[in-house]
């Protein structure tokens, strides 16, 4: 079985000089590709990058990263040039997918983004009849459609043309069909619920001293780590920032590290200054995934204030490292986290967040118990070497049915 993974804006993080978005969904596609490669299957990963093309084998996966060739913006009508470039990029990516299908004799394509990635994959695979499996992990496609109503027919067509929708949780499946109903979509595509978990090998041999030196972290500081994109919707770093003054009343040696970028990045920095807590909060931006894991392993608490979550990769990594995961009391997080057992649930309120942080930092016995239970839960549920067998079975069934 030869499998192509396609994520247009998410290059492999281990390939140096890349500055693409390395988020939870992209990490998971990569883990699936590498675990299937470990089972002996031929796996390819295609993405885009600036500069020269790069073809490289990474952990058994043949990676292809090609630049998008754009028309120079010299015309007064910028919107016209942008639309032209969007079409130009889609044509290039479609052609690259077709070439990889032919060169690698691809049997199945696994995608993430509904539009344009899955849309393009369906178009590129039309002649060869290669089946498409789309990972559905959130509502990015829905937000895109709200911003661009003209895409409605294309997105509905995409959901109906894929051979399988692969939801990462029951919650996401339910929300997706709620959106289908709201939009008047009629989608009859088969679906499964499956998630890869995390690769425990990534948690090994982390150089903690190197990371402490790199980010100037002190053993005397109580580190609270928050890893999430600074979106205009759903993510709530503001709650954590507003909680800091209350925490400082009880615990002075606090250091909050915020990892991620996005539209709200500067606004959150301004908020920290307005509240006078900017010296206690560091905005690290986007940093290598391995550095995130290293900082997570030395943090006292991993905080995750949010209004919407698919199935957080940060949660899985935090639990696997045996760290108290303090998360907003929302689905599907509260289907995994049992308050006070393997993590902490809290309502989206700065005072409540502050109370939970102080409670955890001042109660070592309870924190240690949560850490132990978190690690046990993660090993049972999130081990990618076990979970990949479900993907193997599903992909083989789809390929067999397609022949």
Image (cartoon, grey):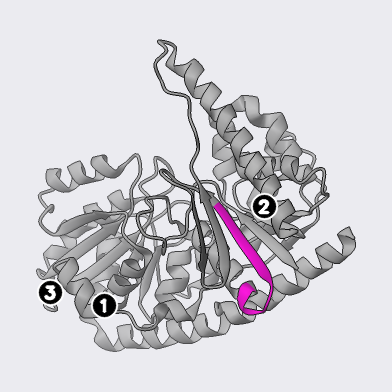
Front one among 322 and 95: 95
Q: Residue at x 11, y 77 (%)?
A: 220
Which quarter of the figure has residue 284? Answer: bottom left
Q: Residue at x 14, y 73 (%)?
A: 221
Q: Is residue 40 magenta?
A: yes
Q: Are marks 2 and 1 in contact (CB under 8 Å)?
A: no
Instruction: Please tell me which of labels 3 and 1 falls first in the chain.
Output: 3
Q: Secondary structure at mark 3?
A: loop
Number of residue marks: 3
Residue 140 point in image, percent of width and height:
55, 44
Quarter of the image for the N terminus: give it.
bottom right
Q: Secondary structure at mark 1?
A: helix
Which quarter of the figure has residue 150? Answer: top right
Q: Secondary structure at mark 2?
A: helix
Residue 271 point in image, percent of width and height:
20, 44
Q: Up-down: is 129 above or below 319?
A: above
| Magenta residue span | 37-46
Identify the disc placed on residue 100.
Answer: 2
Instruction: Please tell me which of labels 2 and 3 falls first in the chain.
Output: 2
Q: Up-down: is 77 above or below 241?
A: above
Residue 116 seen: yes
Q: Residues within 10 Å of mark 3 (few under 14, many from 20)?
A: few
Residue 33 point in image, percent of width and height:
60, 67
Identify the disc placed on residue 67.
Answer: none
């Amino acid at each position: 079985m030869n499998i192509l993974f396609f994520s247009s804006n998410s290059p492999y993080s281990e390939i140096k000089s890349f500055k693409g978005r390395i988020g939870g969904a992209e990490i998971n596609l990569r883990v699936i590709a590498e675990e299937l490669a470990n089972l002996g299957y031929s796996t390819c990963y295609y993405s885009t990058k600036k500069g020269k093309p790069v073809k490289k084998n990474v952990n058994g996966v043949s990676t292809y990263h090609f630049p998008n060739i754009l028309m120079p913006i010299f015309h007064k009508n910028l919107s016209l040039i942008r639309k032209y470039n969007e079409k130009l990029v889609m044509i290039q990516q479609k052609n690259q997918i077709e070439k990889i299908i032919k060169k690698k004799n691809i049997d199945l394509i696994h995608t993430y983004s509904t539009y344009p990635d899955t849309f393009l994959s369906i178009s590129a695979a039309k002649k060869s009849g290669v089946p498409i499996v789309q990972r559905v992990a959130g509502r990015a496609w829905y937000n895109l459609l709200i911003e661009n109503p003209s895409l409605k027919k294309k997105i509905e067509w995409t959901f109906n043309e894929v051979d399988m929708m692969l939801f990462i949780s029951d919650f996401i499946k339910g929300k997706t069909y709620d959106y289908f109903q709201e939009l008047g979509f009629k989608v009859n595509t088969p679906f499964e619920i499956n998630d890869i978990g995390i690769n425990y090998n990534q948690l090994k041999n982390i150089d903690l001293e190197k990371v402490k030196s790199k980010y100037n972290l002190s053993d005397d500081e109580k580190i609270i780590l928050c890893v999430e994109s600074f979106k205009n919707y759903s993510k709530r770093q503001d709650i954590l920032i507003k909680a800091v003054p209350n925490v400082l009343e009880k615990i002075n040696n606090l250091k909050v590290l915020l990892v991620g970028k996005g539209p709200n990045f500067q606004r959150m920095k301004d908020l920290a200054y307005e509240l006078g807590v900017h010296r206690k909060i560091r905005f690290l931006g986007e940093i290598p995934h391995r550095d995130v894991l290293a900082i997570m392993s030395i943090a006292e608490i991993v905080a995750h204030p949010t209004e919407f979550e698919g199935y957080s990769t940060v949660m899985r990594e935090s639990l696997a490292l045996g760290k108290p995961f303090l998360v907003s009391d929302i689905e599907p997080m509260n289907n995994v986290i049992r308050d006070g057992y393997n993590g902490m649930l809290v309502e989206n309120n700065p005072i409540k967040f502050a109370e939970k942080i102080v409670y955890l930092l001042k109660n070592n016995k309870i924190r240690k118990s949560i850490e132990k239970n978190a690690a046990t839960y993660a090993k049972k549920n999130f081990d990618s070497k076990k979970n990949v067998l479900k993907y193997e079975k599903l992909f083989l069934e789809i390929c067999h049915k397609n022949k």
